């Protein structure tokens, strides 16, 4: 099955080449699409040079910083237009463990959506403060309580989708731009009664650059989750209807 790993970037020049190398080592059969939002630090130029060396790497350049959700929507559209069967989301800062890519993709043999989870058995987030651990766990608890999504790590951005899943959840019509995009796609998959699995990962703190997290992103997530509770996603008649099954893959 043809696999595409989508890596959104903004000012990740210090990390992107290492991440690309890691993907090629642990998932060599995959293609990679970097979606760069006109990074002023030259990330796009580094990736452009990499495409000349490795034909499995492509660059999609956008004119301005338009958010994580917008980058993934552009990447999803590219993936579906080019006939990919599996689409993976992966951060460019090195926090997502590339060595878990094979397990994440393998989980799709029995799932429609696979999530790399910090909060299942054998998962962790090394180097995090107690406050950050608490905040992340509380966020997932809030999502489970508000939306009924039985997932331990609702905000993880390390994910793999079947192409049919993106069509079922109508990913192109999502509207979130921050990290709430991850909650929105999860909510839609749950509403479509798709099969979701969680794969344990060890999440690492970035070594270079600065986090994109902000108060505005947190506020967007809180308000949108409340909105989706009042106005849940309604799948179309064409949406998938596989039985819900929450599994943990070793």
Image: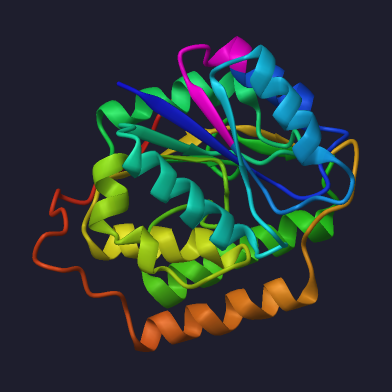
Closer to us: 179 or 42: 42
Considering only vertical position in the picture, is 96 above or below 101? below
x and y, in percent, of residue 144 in the image:
45, 67
Q: Nearer the viewer, residue 114 or 133?
A: 114
Q: Residue at x 49, y 63 (%)?
A: 183
Magenta-drawn segment? 24-33
In the rendered view, tell whether residue 64 sits above or below residue 198: below
Q: Residue 206 in the image: x percent, y percent?
A: 83, 39
At x 30%, y 32%, the residue is: 85
Q: Horizontally, is 62 left or right of 16 in the view? A: left
Closer to us: 84 or 23? 84
Q: Based on the picture, tell me whether residue 160 belongs to the magenta stretch.
A: no
Residue 31 sits inside the magenta stretch: yes
Q: What residue appears at the point 57 percent right and 48 percent down from the top-left corner?
A: 157
In the visual, does 94 lie left or right of 154? right
Q: Quadrant of residue 79?
A: top left
- Give me the residue at 37% from left, 22% from top: 106
Q: At which x and y percent is residue 191?
A: 26, 65
Q: Is residue 244 left or right of residue 60?
A: left
Q: From the image, which quarter does the N terminus lie in?
A: top left
Residue 126 shows in the view: no
- Nearest the viewer among 15 and 36 is 36
Q: Residue 131 at x, y = what percent?
A: 82, 60
């Amino acid at each position: 099955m043809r696999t595409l790993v989508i890596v959104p970037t903004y000012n990740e020049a210090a990390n992107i080449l290492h991440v690309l190398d890691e993907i090629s080592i642990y998932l060599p059969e995959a293609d990679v699409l970097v979606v760069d939002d006109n990074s002023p630090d030259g990330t796009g130029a580094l990736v452009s040079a990499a495409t000349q060396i490795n034909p499995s790497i492509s660059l999609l350049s956008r004119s301005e910083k338009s958010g994580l959700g917008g980058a993934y929507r552009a990447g999803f559209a590219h993936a579906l237009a080019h006939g990919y069967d599996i689409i993976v989301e992966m951060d460019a800062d090195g926090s997502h463990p590339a060595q878990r890519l094979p397990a994440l993709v393998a989980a799709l043999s029995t799932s429609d959506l696979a999530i790399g989870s910090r909060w299942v058995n054998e998962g962790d987030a090394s180097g995090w403060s107690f406050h950050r651990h608490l905040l992340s766990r509380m966020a997932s608890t809030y999502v489970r309580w508000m939306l009924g999504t039985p997932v331990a790590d609702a905000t993880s951005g390390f994910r793999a989708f079947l192409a049919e899943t993106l069509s079922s959840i109508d990913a192109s019509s999502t509207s979130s731009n921050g990290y709430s995009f991850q909650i929105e796609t999860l909510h839609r998959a749950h509403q479509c009664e798709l099969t979701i699995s969680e794969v344990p990962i060890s999440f690492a703190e970035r070594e270079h650059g600065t986090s994109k997290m902000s108060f505005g992103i947190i506020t967007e997530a809180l308000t949108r989750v409340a909105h989706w509770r009042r106005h849940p996603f309604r799948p179309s008649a064409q949406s998938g209807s596989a039985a819900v099954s929450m599994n943990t893959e070793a």
